[in-house]
Amino acid sequence: MASSRQIELAREAGKRIHHFHGGLRLRHNKKISCLDPVERPPLPEVLVVPLLQHAGDIADPLVHAGDTVLKGQPIGQCQPCAAIHSPVSGLVEAIEDRPMSHPSGQKGPCVVIRPNGKEQWIELKPLSNWLDANPDSLITQIQSCGLAGLGGAVFPTHTKMRDGRDRETHTLILNGVECEPYISCDEMLMREQPDKIILGARVLRRVLGAEHVIIAIEDQMGSVQRSLTGSAEFAESENISVVKVPKIYPEGGERQLVQVLTGLEVPAGGRPSDLGLICQNVATAAAVAEAVTEGKPLIERYITVTGNGISHPRNYLALFGTPVSHLVDCCGGYTGDVARLVVGGPMMGYPLESDKAPVVKASNCLLALSHQDIAEPQPEMPCIRCGECARVCPAMLLPQQLHLQIRNELWKPVEEYGLSECIECGCCDFVCPSHIPLVDWFRYGKGELRKQALESEAVELARKRFEDREARLLRIKQERAQKMAHRKQMLKGKTAQQERIQASIKRAENRSRSMPEEQSSGERDDT
Amino acid sequence: MISILILSALGLVFGLGLGWAALRFHIDSDPVVERIDALLPQTQCGQCGYPGCRPYAEAISVEEADINQCPPGGEAGIRALADLLGREPKPLNPENGEETPKTVVLIDESRCIGCTLCIQACPVDAIVGAAKLMHTVIKSECTGCNLCLPPCPVDCIDIVEVETHKPRWRRPRPQAVPLRVL
């Protein structure tokens, strides 16, 4: 838990710019995709909406093959995560396993929808009087519209907001720092939809009961600052400031951004809300504005299609379920030299097996890298303990130690050295002179730790059930023994009683034997 | 003379202190048993020859049983026990069984006659049912000990693999790029 002094310091967020440990200065490569205004691509032939869009369980489908759906109709629900809505009006062709844009590259259940081109919306229920609505109804609206963090982690927005509302949150930070190279979707959104972002910020601020809103952008985004501060919404709002932060990767990480704005570290295992701060992506804020004032569910997002493998890189406002091959076709197709397709940025993205995979809530960028962009896989050499990885690690971990411990499966020290604090930014990978795939090792290690936690939970459960059963069997045995003893006592009691009865009978007999003499004497008296 | 007196007085004081601490912080159960029990897989399967994990832990602690008698714990379990007890790890005793991937059991409900024999055999109460009514296994609580198999009079219990579905997908261990020989 953060001390009150730290929370006091956190209130000063954005007044001074601080630094975080490590990080890298990378070539941006963003300009190539920022030249054209953002458009909606033409409707594809079919849309494939995966029922698994974030870490967690697969959503339960709410429709069947053959159903007709309207645009914005809920098609999947899953209690702790966000709902999934139909991006178009049309016919559900099937619910089947298809490639689903997931790091595993596995197929998963998807709803396949053939659009009918009519774009019929389901009846929308906006909260037009959101200024008077209570925070709970706003959170319910956010939840029913299926909002999730659009920065890439896809954390359900309503969960984060509920956490922020339940604690004393003083500042809302909107994260517009797109620190990874190539990605420009948030920059384009801030240029083109500043009013929506600021309106969303006001809604979120009302939900949280926060005082300030800070919109953090990179120091090179001059036009973005002009567009945000020049918007009509901004002129009407109070206590909203746009703060420029220096361009160092991975500044867009939640913890790093908090450190840059406040100079405070988010405690290990904690969240920014411990300091009274809530971070949301700018795209999430824009989606909140649409969800609350127009009632529109989350069915589309800005996505950057870029890289040297794309003929005409640009940004699109794409419906979820659009196959990425369709977007590439709209961009003029591939240049012919594509070595790898990546979803996300070059540092943290994951490779895509085929371009049939769809756009999902998490897809901020589709990157087609040419052969000259990617280094040939280098043979892995032993760690020489140069310490470069520790120097660049923004979480201040010791990657070289963690790597050796994971390799040797020493899980206890791995936990103690804070593997769970690793944000998988890839800085250590990038600088490693021995070409060790450190992040791959850390992801593997995290998976193993999670598995072990689940297993030890199961072991504890089995132990408890076994002990409870033993205790129960013992109790039943004791109870039975007690009952037996009691019955024996009763039997013994019975014999004693019978003896008493026998004795009284005997006494009575004795008496009756003596009685006739008395009676006879009486009779004699009478006569 | 004074030094002798001081030292004996100190000895007396410390002796009393230690004696008091021994009474005050007395522990009834044997902590070694607890620590051994914590390393065992709690399947309660009895393959070690003892009627559960705790009795086996007690037997190990008095050196009545060896550390290589637990097939579900496998090599990793033996290594952990060897570390704890400061002994040499040794291969699993084949008399106790083989290390196999974790399984659970499933009752074929159409064949179950409701005899309750498996319920009585289950060491962790993971089977629900009543006399002459269908029984079923609580999958999340089954440890895969297979103790319910022998008593079943109609052989309606099958061993099945534990299914891992997609959200539980884990990253594989990274594969090294082979070194090129020039």
Image: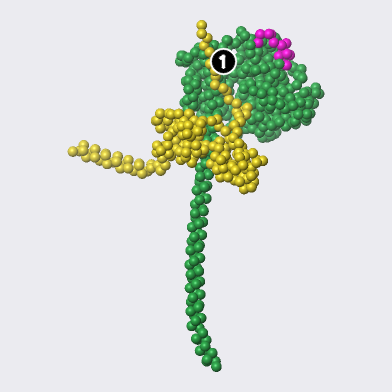
Chain colours: A green, B yellow
In front of the other: A190 or B70 = B70
Give the total number of marks visible in the rendering: 1
- Residue drawn at x 61%, y 42% is B154
Residue that protrudes farthest toward the bottom in the picture: A527
The image quarter containing residue B161 is top right
Label 1 marks a residue whose chain is A
Q: Position of residue A201 (x, y in %)?
A: 66, 25
Q: Is A329 contained in the magenta span? A: yes
The dominant secondary structure in magenta is loop
Say which residue label 1 marks: A248
Instruction: Estimate the x, y position of residue A131 in percent, counting from the top left.
Output: 70, 31
> Which residue, as the protein is rendered here, is positioned at the far top?
B182
Counting from the top left corner in percent of width and height, residue B81 is at 44, 32
Q: Is residue A124 above or below residue B147?
A: above
Disc 1 residue type? Ile
Whether residue B176 sits left or right of residue A151 in the image: it is left
Q: Which residues are magenta?
A: A326-338
Name the secondary structure under disc 1: loop
Report crowding for label 1: few under 14, some 14 to 19, many 20 or more residues within 10 A (C-alpha): some
Residue B17 is situated, as x and y percent measured from the top left of the image, at 32, 41
Can residue A460 be seen here? The reply is no
Residue located at (50% from left, 83% from top) = A515
Whether residue A348 is visible to the viewer of this picture, yes or no, is yes
Work out which quarter of the rendered image holds the C terminus of chain A and state it. Answer: bottom right
